[in-house]
Image (cartoon, rainbow, N blue to C red):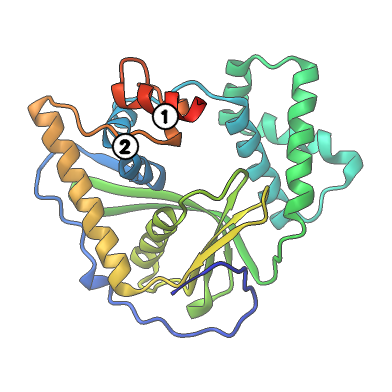
Amino acid sequence: MVTVSCLFGESAHVYCFDVAMTRIVPTVPGDQLRVSATAFMTFRQCPQRANARFQGYFGDPTVVSFVGSLAHQIFKRHLTDGPIDVEEFEMVCRQEMGKSLNLGNTLVQLGLKPSELRGVIAQVRDLYERFVRVPQDEFTAAEVMFEIEAAEALTLVGQIDAVFGEGSGVRLVDWKTGALGEAEGQLMFYALLWALENDQLPQKVMAVSVKTGETFSSEPSGDAVEELALEVGAMVDELRTAWINGVELTRRGGPWCEYCPILDGCGEGAATMEVLSS
């Protein structure tokens, strides 16, 4: 069942799940492969773009992505350490940038001037002020990491932004700092990770756009999780077959083309950007 409201604190239901029935079995052998929710969703959007990611083509960082990454660190700090005072907000942001190797490296790559960095922090502060209005009852954990050997030479990885509730009433939440977008596939990937790790489905998976206030929620079923597991296996087979045969995969245009690292020379991408800019 899919809904569009944020319902924290509701009564829990028991969701039976037989993890033994969920198998990711690629039929094409290959080297060790790590599949994340981002890689899976990228493949759904444009298989060739996902192929490029697996080859190491991620594109240049952007200020938008940096703001989102820093905001996620601030959200985590709020959930684990408590509210952040207005007077200390800039200092806390700088602390988080100093602690995170990824944020530090991105900051260097972007080459932001001090005045530009203050503008970034102002954007993060605006997101934080919206974030604190989101219901946060029954918070359990933030940025829960998963690394699961799902099949031979196949590892599923992921990071769930926040977990609320316990036992059969667990709710997995993904914070969005931009538009909500197409969230269902990513959330179901997280439900699969949770089920494989805990032998139990989460009661609910949710995406919350801190920026717009939009929410998307779904109660994962065993059938839906098993179907997604089959889709992951088929994706791995398609990628490995392309690598063995030295061929490209399908290119599909969409909003993601704007930041695509292989946009140059892509007919589908060029046509999409022409439409989007008109």
Q: Secondary structure at mark 2?
A: loop
Residue 65 spot, x, y in % from top left:
58, 32
Q: Secondary structure at mark 1?
A: helix
Residue 91 spot, x, y in % from top left:
82, 34
Count residues near mark 2 (Cα–Cα under 10 Å), then give few for <14, some for 14-19, many for 20+.
Answer: some
Q: Which is more toward the observer, 249 or 70?
A: 249
Q: Which is more toward the observer, 75 or 230?
A: 230
Residue 108 vertical placement versus 219 (above, below): above
Residue at 76% of width from left, 32% of height from top?
121
Which residue carries the number 2 mark?
Answer: 46
Q: Quadrant of residue 225?
A: bottom left
Residue 28 vertical placement versus 245 (above, below): below
Count up the numbered dots.
Answer: 2
Image quarter hosting the N terminus: bottom left
Which residue carries the number 1 mark?
Answer: 257
Disc assigned to residue 39: none
Classify residue 271 as left or right of residue 259.
left
C-alpha distance separating marks 2 and 1: 9 Å
Residue at 37% of width from left, 45% of height from top?
41
Residue at 91% of width from left, 40% of height from top?
87
Looking at the rendered structure, the kind of residue marked 1 is: Cys
Would you say the residues marked 2 and 1 are in contact, meaning their CB atoms lie under 8 Å apart? Answer: yes
Residue at 39% of width from left, 55% of height from top?
185
